[in-house]
Amino acid sequence: MQDTPKRSGVADLTLDDFFSRDRAMQRCLELARMASGTTLPILLLGESGTGKTLLARAIHNSSSRKERAFVAFNAAALSDTLLDSQLFGHERGAFTGADQRVKGKFELADGGTLFLDEIADLSVSGQSKILRAVEYGEFERLGSESLRTADVRLISATLHPISEFARSGRFREDLFFRINGITITVPPLRERTGDLPLLLVGEIARASRSQKKHIVGLSRDAADRLFSYEWPGNLRELSKVVQAAVALTKDDVIEAEALVLQPSRARASDNGNGTTELVVGSVAAAPSGCTRLRDVVNAHVRHVLASVDGNKRRAARLLGVSRTTLDRRLLDALRR
């Protein structure tokens, strides 16, 4: 899956920019596409670093609210006063230091989407404060008695087992039932080994561009380490590991010594029939023994083109390249 943006930014990311070879991730994206066509609240579940924020933005940009604001808010580690001020805004003089009127996240997201990240980390008091706003779209600015309303599509996310929290009383059941109109689980990277090759290609290409380097691939030892690693930090860790590896690489091939991975997080080897063979065995290896980025990119281009039934315009958009670049890549692939 390419579940990081192929363009320079993420503000215009849509669900058309996501695809995957992994069945669980395909199901996740299928649910996201269906959910984007509704106004139901969405609850995103998944480990830290799996891309929940990117998915939330893509759902918004694929919905009828795409012309209005997408407002993201991290609900963890805020005092009740700060939570009130951040979510609902405040009037001048509402508290010490409030020298001007400020709109809150609900008001800023009116007509659009409010993304509440880490919602399971809200205090019980904090949960009570947002219940009315979530249920009726009504709220008051801190320091004001005037009732305000906002039409907000809510997307929430958490890495915690929030349904268990609700059953145990740690999270309000009434709030839980109002935020999980459609529940979407984003699978961890360690369960999506079929997506790892193309994710690595994209990250290496991005890191190479940003650091103005020319990286052509991985040594076999480096590939073995990456494809036997558990990726506890998921996509966020993948990006940081590749950025560091590119920075530490002096030549054009990333060696195993350039990989900064957590110790004791490697999966057991399966005698060459596992994820390393999935990549190394399916991609032509250079005489030096590296997995060439060019070959994987060409295979990626062909795969994307096939996934959109040969539509070059859509394939170019998914790849984040011009039609001219796509045609050049296809010609290069045919020459191989």
Image (cartoon, rainbow, N blue to C red):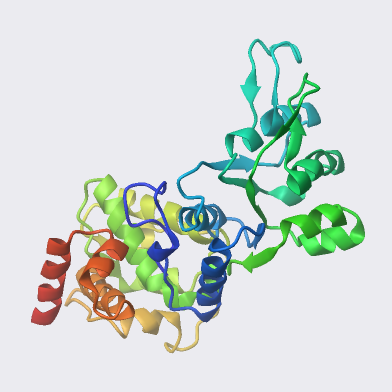
Q: Is residue 100 visible?
A: yes
Give the residue drawn at x 41%, y 59%: 259
Q: Quadrant of the C terminus?
A: bottom left
Q: Is residue 263 visible?
A: no
Give the residue drawn at x 39%, y 50%: 12
**Image quadrant assignment for residue 295:** bottom left
Give residue 230's position: percent from left, percent from top: 54, 69
Give the residue drawn at x 67%, y 30%: 86
Q: Residue furthest toward the right?
A: 169
Give residue 254's position: percent from left, percent from top: 30, 61
**Image quadrant assignment for residue 218:** bottom left
Is 281 positioned to the left or the right of 235 in the image? left
Give residue 75's position: percent from left, percent from top: 69, 42
Is 296 positioned to the left or the right of 78 in the image? left
Is 215 positioned to the left or the right of 189 in the image? left
**Image quadrant assignment for residue 137:** top right
**Vertical position of residue 55 compared to residue 136: above or below:** below
Give residue 97's position: percent from left, percent from top: 69, 11
Q: Quadrant of the N terminus?
A: bottom left
